[in-house]
Image (cartoon, grey):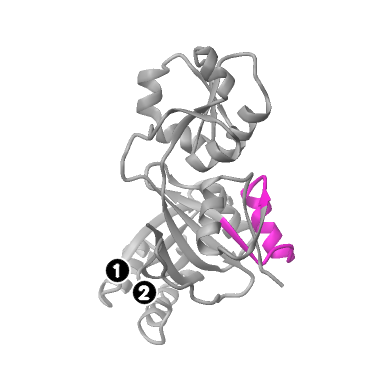
Amino acid sequence: MNQIVGYLGPKATFTDLAVTSLFPHSMKKAYATIPACMDAVSSGQVDYAVVPLENAIEGSVNVTLDYLVHECPLPIVAELIVPISQHLLVHPEQLRKAEAIEVIYSHSHAIAQCHKFLHKVYPNAVYETTSSTAAAAKLISEHRLSKGTACIANSLAAKEYNLSVLAENIHDYENNHTKFIVLHRAEEMANLKESNNLKVVNEKTTIMVMLPSDQSGALHQVLSAFAWRKLNLSKIESRPMKTGLGNYFFIIDINQPNDDILLPGAIKEIEALGCSVKTLGSYTSYLLK
């Protein structure tokens, strides 16, 4: 039986592209929200979920991070970095009528990624957010709205929903990438092989650290546990614990697989400081070429 992979739908999202690249022979099932994807893995409806975690321009996708920590603690078993190209799409009928664009639909991150272009070309347009870029494309395709409308989405969405490209590559920065994570009920998955479009970047471990509330310099001591072991940290980010003002946990990405000596030693040292540590995953990071 083929594996089933859940992703943030509808068809032709960047998440759909990530799933196709990582699991080219698996069945796919689209979900309307990121939490729904994660719940589907937890309940056994699907084998894996692929969800966005971070964008190079807009930063972390907080709903993914918070739901992973607070509601649905699934192991991260892989990561894929995808280059992002945003286009302004319109219904073909609108292109023929040359209507002025008054309303632009897309995901909030996509709108923010194209701020400079939108401010310069469509300063008076109204921006409406949708659950994904593909959801915006589907809306434009299925509903001939009264005002001049457009959406921001990728070329896959233009093809899937038969839309015309009004402007290509409208994102503000050239080095625009989104990081997707793969979630699974078990802590390990079979290593994916490098292919013509998939490259291994490195091996990573992600942990969550909660500091003791009454100990000054605790974060410095935590970072020192990695520094003297020469463990390279690629990211450290704080998020609220949702238990009151000033209560935070830290997400730390370590460019090191979970080994038998260095990483366990660092974690034991951090725990000895009175911190709480949880490993969210030890996994391979891939880049879509």
Residue range highlighted in magenta: 30-50
Q: Which disc, if any, is residue 256?
A: 2
User: Which quadrant of the view contains residue 67?
Assistant: bottom right
Q: Is residue 95 left or right of residue 257?
A: right
Is residue 99 positioned above or below 289 on the image?
A: above
Q: Secondary structure at mark 2?
A: loop
Mark 1 or mark 2, which is nearer the start of the sequence?
Answer: 1
Q: Position of residue 240 (x, y in %)?
A: 51, 50
Residue 9 point in image, percent of width and height: 63, 46
Considering depth in this image, is 180 or 208 the residue closer to the camera?
180
Residues at circles 2 and 1 in contact by the CB criterion of under 8 Å: yes
Q: Which disc number belongs to residue 85?
A: none
Mark 2 to mark 1 CA distance (whole Å): 8 Å
Furthest toward the front, the residue is 96
Q: Residue at x 61, y 75 (%)?
A: 186
- Judge by depth and name the residue closer to the eye, 191 or 142: 142
Question: Residue 49 appears at what percent x and percent y?
Answer: 61, 60
Q: How many numbered discs sit on the rendered protein?
A: 2
Few, some or many C-alpha atoms within 10 Å of disc 2 (few <14, some 14-19, many ≥20)?
Answer: some
In this view, the residue in front, 80 or 216, is 80
Vertical arrangement, residue 245 with respect to residue 214, above or below: above
Horizontal and vertical percent for residue 92? 56, 24
Identify the residue shown where x is 55% and y is 39%. 159
Q: Please check the rendered image and state whether residue 181 is part of the magenta-colored stretch, yes or no.
A: no
Dot 1 corresponds to which residue? 232
